[in-house]
Image (cartoon, rainbow, N blue to C red):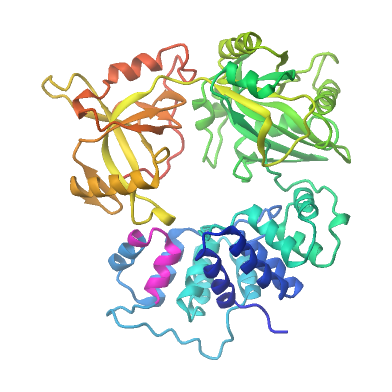
């Protein structure tokens, strides 16, 4: 049978992207998967999910915008400015290249003869991805990319090659829908496919096992990320009590750190984040502490900055993120601990189906037996902490636990049903969360940026500012404190796009500096010091609560109000010293 081609893959995914109906997407993909041979099926499922390899693979392609752009510009003889404008207007590189494939240097249709070479297949893609991962030579990577793109005779091939490379499929196909499509393709029970995916983590392999009716043979494999169990937000203790419906819950502190999943087998330790990315290189001290715990296991928990028995501001974690080299000074000044609050697997036994109270007992036993622990009954060996928990039933008990968490510089509570199993990826009523909220700020929008994906033709990302003094005073200026794109509806984005386009002062690529006219009410979790914003402060996890068309820009908050909230007891991001900035990231004006 002929191997599956990239063009066929592109057409199928385009068809799935063209409908907003999940059942139609599912039917399109299931019919495609059903007719593929095993090797093609494995690759097609992985690529549809946006992965160049299985989730357990340590392979890194190290291919960025610059490499791809250089290869494509050389191949197409396209003017760099034209290419840049295509990317900006398309909102993503994949669709930009599809448009570029119809142009030559002089604007006429491009001819990219395939020569005597056969059609580009999924297998060729996989081999080329292996070659990209195996070489660190940039020129060799560029040659591989140029050869791949030269074999793209159709614009949709170029589009999907880029989409897979950059993990920007934008087809509306999430993992859950893929699981449904696999179940439908091979007429297997959905629950069996979901269970197999949970245990082995590689959807491509799950599809093969479903095809050959071997789903029941799956056993847990470490070193692939399992989706995290999630908590449902509650407004206050009264709402939480109503949700608990008379049940007794465990109240645990909610930490302001990085949610982390730790896999250990022998001396091998891997840490995954909520985004399913590996991150152990940023936390060598945490890895060393985990390595000294006995046996094999899978833990759920939080990496927190911690010293002298107290949680430190989140900025201490930021100092480590994105750094290739962690000096001894950085590690000493930014000490971290792993706080464990759940155990899902231990020494060959899958635990996630057990009730939380049984898993908690296993976790306590693991930490008690640590060789690091000088006293067997002490649950916190150096480098690893056990989350504090207490039983609560009433609103008064929840409020008391909440105050205790705040006194420990934690951001709130997670309430957990002790009888509940661990349900990956689900947000139900077994786990509830209450967080500390800061007072909102009224801010003036100073810039609007074109979004991505379905928002690529809208101004959907907004930079906002406060006044550095009373705006009536001479020299008063707006100073930026953050950027947000969450909290507005599609209708509001359309309205704001029209408005900001009309009041644009200047435009720099995707970014428009706008007349300071629109006021947003902004909510944020914390405020921290920043050397990247003219205000000297930055809002953490900002979101747009309301558009305040009823307010003038002069009515926006002053910097003094930001400082007042920063210094308040509810803002746990404050510290005695200004926190170092995180590793450089693309900013609004980059």
Residue 257 seen in the figure: yes
**Which residues, given as a range, are shown in magenta?**
88-101
x and y, in percent, of residue 249 in the image: 72, 20
- Picture layout, residue 469 above or below residue 494: above
Q: Nearer the viewer, residue 299 or 59?
A: 299
Q: Is residue 202 left or right of residue 458?
A: right
Instruction: Verify whether residue 100 appears in magenta.
Output: yes
Q: Is residue 163 left or right of residue 430?
A: left
x and y, in percent, of residue 175 in the image: 64, 54
Image quadrant where residue 516 sits: top left
- Picture layout, residue 54 above or below residue 122: above
Q: What's the residue at 78%, 39% (across, down)?
A: 264
x and y, in percent, of residue 110 in the image: 37, 82
Q: Nearer the viewer, residue 12 or 70?
A: 12
Residue 460 seen in the figure: no
Residue reaching furthest to the bottom: 116
Image quadrant where residue 210 sits: bottom right
């Amino acid at each position: 049978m002929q191997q599956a081609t990239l063009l066929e893959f592109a057409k199928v995914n385009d068809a799935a992207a063209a409908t907003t109906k999940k059942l139609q997407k599912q039917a399109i993909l299931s019919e495609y998967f059903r007719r593929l041979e095993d090797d093609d099926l494995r690759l097609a499922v992985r690529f549809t999910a946006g992965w160049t390899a299985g989730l357990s693979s340590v392979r890194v392609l190290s291919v960025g915008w610059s490499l791809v752009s250089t290869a494509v510009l050389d191949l197409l003889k396209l003017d760099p400015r034209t290419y840049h404008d295509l990317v900006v207007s398309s909102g993503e590189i994949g669709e930009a290249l599809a448009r570029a494939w119809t142009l030559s240097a002089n604007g006429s249709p491009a001819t990219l003869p395939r020569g005597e070479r056969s059609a580009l297949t999924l297998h060729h893609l996989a081999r080329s991805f292996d070659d990209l991962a195996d070489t660190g030579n940039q020129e060799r990577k560029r040659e591989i990319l140029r050869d791949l793109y030269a074999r793209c005779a159709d614009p949709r091939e170029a589009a999907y090659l880029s989409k897979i490379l950059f993990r920007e499929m934008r087809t509306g196909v999430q993992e859950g829908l893929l699981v449904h499509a696999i179940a439908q393709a091979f007429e297997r029970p959905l629950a069996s496919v979901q269970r197999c995916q949970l245990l082995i983590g590689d959807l491509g392999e799950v599809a093969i096992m479903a095809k050959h009716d071997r789903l029941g043979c799956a056993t847990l494999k470490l070193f692939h990320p399992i989706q995290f169990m999630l908590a449902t937000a509650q407004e206050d203790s009264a709402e939480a009590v109503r949700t608990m419906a008379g049940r007794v819950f465990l109240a645990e502190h909610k930490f302001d750190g990085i949610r982390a999943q730790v896999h250990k087998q022998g001396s091998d330790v891997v840490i995954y984040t909520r985004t399913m990315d590996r991150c152990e290189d940023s936390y060598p001290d945490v890895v060393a502490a985990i390595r000294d715990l006995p046996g094999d296991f899978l833990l759920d928990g939080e990496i927190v900055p911690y010293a002298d028995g107290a949680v430190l501001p989140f900025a201490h974690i930021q100092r480590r993120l994105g750094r290739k080299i962690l000096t001894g000074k950085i590690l000493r000044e930014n000490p971290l601990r792993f706080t464990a609050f759940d155990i899902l697997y231990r020494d060959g036994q899958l635990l996630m189906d057990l009730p939380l109270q049984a898993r908690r007992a296993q976790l306590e036993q693991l930490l008690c037996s640590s060789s690091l622990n000088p006293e067997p009954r002490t649950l916190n060996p150096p480098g690893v902490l056990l989350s504090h928990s207490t039983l609560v039933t009433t609103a008064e008990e929840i409020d008391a636990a909440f105050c205790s968490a705040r006194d420990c510089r934690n951001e709130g509570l997670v309430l957990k049903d002790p009888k509940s199993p661990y349900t990956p990826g689900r947000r139900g009523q077994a786990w509830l969360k209450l967080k500390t909220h800061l007072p909102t700020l009224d801010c003036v929008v100073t810039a609007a940026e074109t979004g991505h994906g379905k928002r690529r033709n809208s101004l959907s990302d907004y930079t906002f500012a406060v006044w550095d003094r009373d705006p009536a005073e001479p020299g008063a200026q707006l100073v930026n404190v953050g950027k947000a794109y969450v909290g507005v509806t599609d209708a509001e984005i359309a309205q704001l796009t029209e408005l900001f386009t009309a009041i644009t002062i200047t435009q720099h690529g995707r970014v428009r500096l706008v007349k300071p006219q629109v006021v947003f009410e902004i909510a944020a979790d914390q405020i921290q010091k920043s050397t990247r914003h003219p205000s000297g402060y930055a809002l953490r996890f900002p979101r747009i609560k309301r558009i305040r068309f009823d307010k003038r820009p002069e009515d926006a908050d002053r910097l003094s109000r930001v400082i007042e909230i920063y210094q308040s007891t509810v803002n746990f991001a404050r510290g005695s010293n200004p926190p170092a900035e995180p590793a450089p990231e693309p900013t609004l004006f980059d």
